Image (cartoon, rainbow, N blue to C red):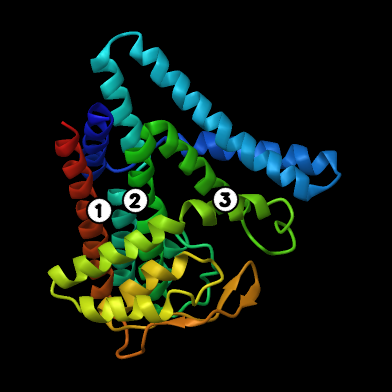
Amino acid sequence: MKMMLGALLAGIVLDLIFGDPQHHPVCTIGWYISWAEKKLRARGGNLRKSAVFLTASAVLLTMTASAALLFILSRFGKLPLFVGMAVMNWLGLAVKSLASEARGVRDALGSSDEEGRKQVARIVGRDTQQLTREEVIKATIETVAENTTDGVIAPMLYAALGGPVLLWGFKAASTLDSMVGYMDERYRDIGWASAKLDDALNYIPARLTAMLLCVTALLLGLDGRNALRMVMRDHDKHKSPNCAWSEAAAAGALHIQLGGTHAYFGKTVEKPTIGDDDRPVCIEDIDKVNRMLYGAALWMAALIAAGWIVGG
């Protein structure tokens, strides 16, 4: 356990320093999901049954590959195993890269609204061509808040519980959800199992993330009490049972309103609003939510470090 948590702390440090590499292992998982989806669709039959196979195979293959790699490294001694675990943990986290993408939108908006729309299209699933400047900022804040859960806190939690193998099982489930876990006509049948698994795996992390964001907001001089109030009031204002928790914390801390109606794949999707429209958003809010992201990550790292010390 001590080695596992130590490797996780090392991985967190590596992520904070280097961010994501140019060629990420998630791309390999994505390639398999795309390939398997095409094969299952071509085969025909009941796509809802195929969805279970797609989800289970992607997660189990990823975990098996992770376990095999660690087993091979263990044959060379504790140091290669520790380094391998640390690197696998690093690659499973997204603190620096998420913050960097958000800053990219901020910088692009400094040039023009059109550049901001192009940049935010890299990190959101909605249609961005008609977004106003305010909507671009809100989309960025929502993405950072939501991905603080599934890109940072959840991977840390699963790595702490089961090392890189469990972390990468979660990453496979998260990748499945981002690729096929939609409820539109095309993906409703092939993606339902992926969506349900992602909901289940993020259930506890989403609520933990919301609490960490509220504490962070208080320490940063933002309105942590209002963040908690919005979490308690608006945590269920989303089709997903998890997404609104962190978004409500961000909205409350910044005294802004998120959510609402957006276009996805050319279709208008009605969503409830989250938070109160106390003031218009501004570009500085992107930096504020980034600081909340880092704060939540550091709080989680502190909890892991405490476990490492106690475990010794």
Front-most of residues 147 and 311: 311
- Looking at the image, is 219 positioned above or below residue 41? below
Neighbourhood count class around disc 3 (C-alpha, 10 Å): few under 14, some 14–19, many 20 upward: some
**Label 2 sits on residue:** 152
The disc at residue 297 is 1
Q: Position of residue 79 (x, y in %)?
A: 23, 16
Q: Residue furthest bottom?
A: 278
Q: Position of residue 208 (x, y in %)?
A: 33, 59
| Residue 266 in view (yes/no) | yes
The residue lying at 31 percent from left, 8 percent from top is 76
Of circles 3 and 2, the one toward us is 3
Along the polypeptide, which appears first: circle 3 or circle 2? 2
- Identify residue type, mark 2: Val
Mark 2: secondary structure: helix
**Left or right: 103 with respect to 309?**
right
Mark 1: secondary structure: helix
- Cα distance, mark 2 to mark 1? 7 Å
**Label 3 sits on residue:** 197
Mark 3: secondary structure: helix
**Left or right: 135 with respect to 90?**
right
The residue lying at 49 percent from left, 51 percent from top is 201
Q: Residue furthest top?
A: 76
- Identify residue type, mark 3: Leu
